[in-house]
Image (spheres, helix red, strand yellow):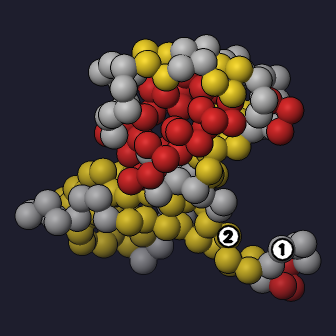
């Protein structure tokens, strides 16, 4: 941590659903894939079930793979031409290959629709992902289990979600 060697380390948070739980898909489920963005360590005294305990408190911040897209500059010309959404999604996926995201998904009925030209000067791959999904007037999210970017339709029943992991006291 002192030498900054804890930065950009892979993080994969997985839980295992046992067969006995009765779910349709028992086994390992990836609920977060990404990399560390900040790691802090401080000496601390905490209250625990056993009383006060002294030790090191490690705080780890992580970002999912889509955050990497903001660090990749668009390098293919000055303007993306008018083209189908399918072709645009493939170009964006290919340009963002260093992030390791497998695919960008949306419903097949949108694939033949045309995207307007978009300037790429001083833009990142993340800017192009936002422009693509903005053309649907929708949002997107990264799915760590499938390693894909998926469209979230406007008015969807998908609520806001976040992940909090803590040790109960």
Of residues 77 and 13, the one drawn nearer to the viewer in this rendering: 77
Quarter of the picture holding the N terminus: bottom left
- 81 w.r.t. 66: above or below: above
Q: Are marks 1 and 2 in contact (CB under 8 Å)?
A: yes
Q: Residue at x 66, y 60 (%)?
A: 146
User: Could you tell me how far apart the alpha carbons at marks 1 and 2 are, in whole angstroms?
Assistant: 9 Å
Q: Residue at x 53, y 39 (%)?
A: 91
Residue 99 is situated, as x and y percent measured from the top left of the image, at: 42, 52
Crowd band around label 1 with a 10 angstrom C-alpha radius: few (<14), some (14–19), many (20+):
few
Left or right: residue 124 compared with residue 23: left
Residue 139 visible in the shown view: no
- 27 w.r.t. 101: above or below: below
Q: Residue at x 30, y 21 (%)?
A: 122
As helix, strand or loop, the secondary structure at mark 1 comes to: loop
Q: Quadrant of residue 156?
A: top right
Q: Residue furthest left?
A: 3
Find disc 2 in the rendering and name its residue.
29
Crowd band around label 2 with a 10 angstrom C-alpha radius: few (<14), some (14–19), many (20+):
some
As helix, strand or loop, the secondary structure at mark 2 comes to: strand
Residue 83 is situated, as x and y percent measured from the top left of the image, at: 63, 24
Which labelled disc corresponds to residue 55? none
Find disc 1 in the rendering and name its residue.
25
Of residues 123 and 48, the one drawn nearer to the viewer in this rendering: 123
Left or right: residue 1 compared with residue 102: left
- 92 w.r.t. 33: above or below: above
């Amino acid at each position: 941590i002192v030498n900054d060697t804890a930065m950009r380390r892979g993080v994969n948070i997985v839980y295992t659903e046992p067969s006995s739980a009765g779910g349709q898909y028992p086994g390992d489920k990836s609920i977060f894939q990404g990399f560390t963005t900040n790691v802090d360590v401080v000496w601390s005294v905490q209250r625990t079930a056993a009383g006060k305990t002294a030790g090191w408190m490690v705080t780890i911040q992580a970002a999912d793979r889509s955050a990497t897209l903001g660090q990749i500059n668009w390098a293919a010309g000055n303007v993306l031409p008018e083209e189908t959404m399918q072709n645009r999604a493939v170009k964006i996926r290919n340009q963002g290959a260093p992030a390791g995201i497998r695919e960008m998904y949306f419903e097949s009925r949108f694939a033949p629709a045309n995207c307007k030209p978009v300037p790429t000067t001083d833009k990142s791959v993340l800017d192009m992902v936002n422009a693509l999904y903005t053309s649907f007037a929708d949002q997107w999210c990264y799915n760590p289990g499938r390693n894909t970017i998926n469209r979230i339709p406007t008015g969807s029943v998908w609520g806001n979600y976040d992940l909090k992991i803590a040790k109960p006291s």
